Image: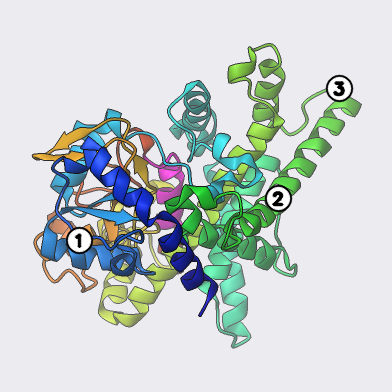
Amino acid sequence: MDIFTCLLCLVLILCISIQAFNSLANPRSRKQLPPGPKPLPIIGNFLEFGDKPHKSSARLSKSYGPLISLKLGRVTTIVVSSPIMAKEVLQVHGQFFSNRPILDSARASNHVHLSIISLPVSTLWRELRKICNVHLLAARVLNANMNLRHNKVEELLCDVRKSAEAGEAVEIGKAAFRASLNLLSTTFFSMELADTNSNTVREFKETVRGFIDELGKPNLADFFPFLRKIDPQGIRRRTDFHFRKMLDLFDCIINERLQLREVSGSVKDNDILDTLIDMMVIGEEKSAHDQIDKTIIEHLLLDIFAAGTETTSSTLEWSMAELLKAPEILSRAQAELKQVIGKGNQVKESDITRLPYLQAVVKETLRLHPAAPLMVPRKAENDVEVCGYTIPKDSQLLVNVWAMGRDPNIWENPHKFMPERFLKLNIDVLGHDFELIPFGAGRRICPGLPLATRMLHLMLGSLC
């Protein structure tokens, strides 16, 4: 019997009487929850949820509808699987679902209290969001460093050509990860964190993938809070190890820049790191509750570099895989590029608006293979009535983007890769069309969306 099964048995023995008492005493339990499978004592619906929750909850939605309730240990979980319901919870009632539940794994290195992803809507969260929207990812900033992205993509193409000439297979995911990592590090730090001949790419990718995997694992400590102190599966410990590797790297880079400033007495690079350091210096004059200090900047960089490398490279990898499986689609994309760009010419960001079929390929990839099949969980701040059902306070809300992307009631031939469907549909990924929200929607929409979409189109168009 494995440790997971043993712990579940222990939880069953220790807590069955407490759960029964709370169910009788708590009036909220008698409210009209969304439909769902009947939970077992203590463990609830863990068996139905499984190790691939986006697929299992999609199956359950076929039986119980687009708004279902599950009991996962002590946590009531509501799963949304239709655009109409997604709009209800993310837009109509968005003010009640803007915060996050605190995942035990995110407590590692105190990240949960410093991360723009995990923070509740607060003064610090608004400040970090403003920094991203105004100083890091605004259109004027992205336009200003457009040539840098073009150069990094050209380097990616050179690597691919060298591999082709040597008769070597190209690992697209790794190549795209390296290009994304160097793009971000050059933009932020005026230095490349990875080169072709180093192990940095592999180590950085393993670190990012490591903590993303840990954050995504079902964690007993999240569903049975009294287990948090002992971290029974070791998830928080392993996440802390991965976090520390990245945070130590950023700490070293920031310290070197501070020392350089002290020696030279001036700003040399005038890059995004200098902008962040300027905010950090100004922040020393602020009150303690909203100060932007070095630790906060390090955790912000952790979020940006993790999201900006792994999700972009994995989506590009899926695009290339789908195109290689469908030569006729690849040929059509290549024909569009040849007609609009010209044979042998480099794709520029300014060309993207003139490449509707390329845009359709990216949308179709995001429909079938969203980077986060279940959006980052939301938390209900109050009891909220949605379509006649009560979503109780403190429940966890999951939006199944994967299920909506494969719903036959929305899409014709939903499991088939058909980019041309988007040539007829006026749908984008900006959070307005709830049939396709791979970056989320509402006030917690992914702040990296503007850069991600530019990079995806630029790299995919160049590789085609």
**Residue 136 visible, this angle:** yes
> x%, y% of residue 420?
18, 65
Residue under numbered circle 2: 244
Residue 436 vs 262, above or below: the answer is below
Residue 446 lies within the magenta run: yes
Q: In the image as oriented, which residue stretches furthest toward the right?
A: 263
Residue 450 found in image quarter: top left
Residue under numbered circle 1: 38
- Assess whether mark 3 and mark 1 are in contact (beta carbons under 8 angstroms): no
Residue under numbered circle 3: 265
Quarter the C terminus occupies: bottom left
Q: Nearer the viewer, residue 153 or 56?
A: 56
Residue 282 found in image quarter: top right
- Assess whether mark 2 and mark 3 are in contact (beta carbons under 8 angstroms): no
The residue carrying pointer 3 sits among few (fewer than 14), some (14 to 19) or many (20 or more) residues within 10 Å by Cα, namely: few
Distance of label 1 from label 2 (alpha carbons): 41 Å
The residues colored magenta run 445-458
Distance of label 1 from label 3 (alpha carbons): 67 Å
Q: If you read the primary sequence from the N terminus, does the residue marked by circle 1 or circle 3 appear first?
A: 1
* Residue at 74 percent of width and 48 percent of height: 249
Q: Nearer the viewer, residue 61 or 7?
A: 7
Under mark 1, the amino acid is Lys
Is residue 128 found left or right of 101 in the rendered image?
Answer: right
* Mark closer to the observer (3, 2): 2
Magenta span: predominant SS is helix
Under mark 3, the amino acid is Gly
Q: If you read the primary sequence from the N terminus, does the residue marked by circle 1 or circle 2 appear first?
A: 1
Q: Secondary structure at mark 3?
A: loop
Q: Secondary structure at mark 1?
A: loop
> x%, y% of residue 196?
70, 68
Under mark 2, the amino acid is Arg
